[in-house]
Image (cartoon, helix red, strand yellow):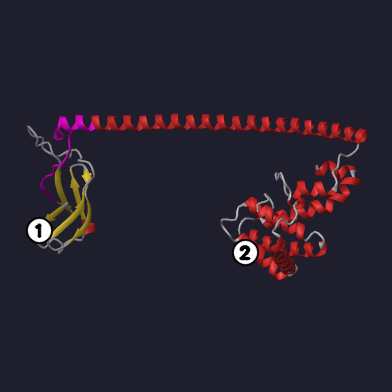
Amino acid sequence: MCSQGDNLDLAVTKDELEVMVGEGVCAVKTLTRNHLYCEPPPQQPPPGPNGKKREGSDNLPEFTVRMGNLNFSLGKVQYDTLSLATFPLEAQIGVGVGASIVALIVLIIVLIYRRKSKQALRDYKKVQIQLENLETSVRDRCKKEFTDLMTEMMDMSSDLVGSGIPFLDYRRYAERIFFPGHRESPLRRDLDVQECRRQTVEQGLVQLSNLLNSKLFLTKFIHTLESQRTFSPRDRAYVASLLTVSLHGKLEYFTDILKTLLNDLVEQYVAKNPKLMLRRTETVVEKLLTNWMSICLYAFVRVSHHIYSRYN
């Protein structure tokens, strides 16, 4: 609250002034030559005991300044009040309806969220129960299959004790291992060429045999075949079996070649996907390894019952 005048601070200081608004005190904040600033009460106080009451709306507190024994009444003070009457009824109704709609929307969202949460929890428990049932089913199936396998092994063992191991002679054994599914084995074929060309063909076969005895040539030859996209897995197995037959009489050289090729294969799978190594016989090297193991195990098939049972 501000009051204006002349020479206000010549005779008194702000501490010597007492400013009243009705029965309330207006705290003096600043006193200058021409202005008096004070902070009125936050609410409109009642008029003082000496205030004159009049008809109508003049029942207001007086603004009084006291300097010692002197009192100066500077007029009446009226506080500005915001009543509900100044706020239109239509606006009040609109605010109420809007608040109700917002509250309803929030309530619907909360209900939908709770429903979705409960549905998700039910689905999770349902999936968990299905997984537990599947695990139980797989476990029971594995137990049953293992029991059946043990029973079959025992039956096989009893049959072998009574009748002996039904092994084949080495030639037929090699034919079935090297060339499965072929009606006519290449091991039983003779050189079917015209007599005029026989010497040339035999000469070429000798030169090919000399090349196959070169480790560098043979490894490069196999790698070149492996890199051909049109070289099917069936063709690779057939070529590997033919190489096995040609190197059969030089098992140490065959083993050395196989070690080199396996080392290259390991490096190749480590760079890509090591879990797939030796899973399937799709390369020349893998078929060579299968043939090499078959050659080495044949002697044990005839004398070892347990190795035969596992190998079979």
Seen in the picture, residue 103 relative to 38 is either above or below; the reply is above
Between discs 2 and 1, the one toward the N terminus? 1
> Is 72 within the magenta?
yes
Q: Which residue is mark 1?
A: 5
In the rendered image of this protein, does residue 18 appear above or below residue 144?
A: below
Total number of numbered labels?
2
Q: Position of residue 211 (x, y in %)?
A: 72, 69
Q: Nearer the viewer, residue 180 or 153?
A: 180
Residue linked to disc 2: 224
Considering the numbered disc 2 on the image, is that residue within a helix, a strand or a loop?
Answer: helix
Residue type, mark 1 in image: Gly
Q: Nearer the viewer, mark 2 or mark 1?
A: 2
Q: Secondary structure at mark 1?
A: loop
- Residue 109 visible? The answer is yes
In the rendering, at what x and y percent does residue 195 appear?
A: 72, 61
What's the magenta region? Answer: 71-96
